[in-house]
Amino acid sequence: MKKIKIQVEVSARHIHLSQKDLDILFGKKYYLKKLKDLSQHGQFAAKEEVVSVKNREYSFRIVGPVRKESQIEISRTGAIDLGIDVPLKLSGDLKKVKSLIEVKGPKGKVKVKAIVAKRHLHCLLEEAKRLGLKKNQKVKVLIKGERELVLHNVIVRPEEEYNLSCHIDTDEANASGLGSVCGSGFLIK
């Protein structure tokens, strides 16, 4: 069994917005202000946040740039806390998603589809070939430590400009003792 050391990143609750929804929340032709770059090329945490309207008040950091369709990514624990049933889906796969979270910004409110994002492994297309990985293949990732954990069903997502890293949510990070931002693990082949 071959193990390849990889970065494991914790994806906290956040929101991706379409330009249409961004305009409703922040005003016409609004542009996001970059707080910091994220590990994946071209993606960034914006300075702006929005807040959930019902039940508990949750803030959601906006991740830019804008997308074709808005979506919220939240952990299962967060969804339970908000009192909503949220499906487990790949980020961007919003077909048949009926769970909505209403959020407000300084200029308005919108209802956004919400998911619990499936754990996944980003990598460059060339890297996927070199490692013998295929799009949507399920692999395992080992996170070592006092609470050592093997994550099964990590979905491979090769793209033109992705850096090799596994993304998990805060529930998975807490269960493995990983920490709040990132750590390392091993891709098990």
Image: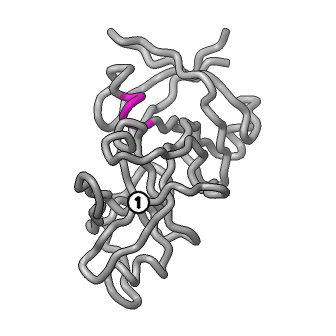
Magenta segment main secondary structure: helix
Quadrant in which the C terminus appears: top right
Tell whether position 174 is magenta: no
Residue carrying label 1: 101
Q: Nearer the viewer, residue 129 or 51?
A: 51
Q: Position of residue 69 (x, y in %)?
A: 56, 69
Q: In this picture, is 37 found above or below 106?
A: above
Quadrant in which the N terminus appears: top right
Tell whether position 172 is magenta: yes
Question: In the rendered image, which quarter is residue 132 located in?
Answer: top right
**Extent of the magenta region:** 169-173
Q: Position of residue 57 (x, y in %)?
A: 23, 56
Q: In this picture, is 177 found above or below 130?
A: above
Q: Position of residue 80 (x, y in %)?
A: 37, 40
Q: In this picture, is 162 found above or below 18?
A: above
Residue drawn at x 40%, y 53% as measured from the top left: 38
Horizontally, is 144 left or right of 152 in the view? left
Badge count = 1
Q: Nearer the viewer, residue 72 or 36?
A: 72
Residue drawn at x 47%, y 23% as measured from the top left: 185
Residue drawn at x 51%, y 18% as measured from the top left: 142
Question: In the rendered image, which quarter is residue 108 located in?
Answer: bottom left
Q: In this picture, is 151 found above or below 48?
A: above
Question: In the rendered image, which quarter is residue 148 located in?
Answer: top left
Residue drawn at x 29%, y 66% as measured from the top left: 50
Kind of residue at disc 1: Ile
Q: Nearer the viewer, residue 102 or 46?
A: 102
Q: Position of residue 104 (x, y in %)?
A: 30, 71
Q: Secondary structure at mark 1?
A: strand
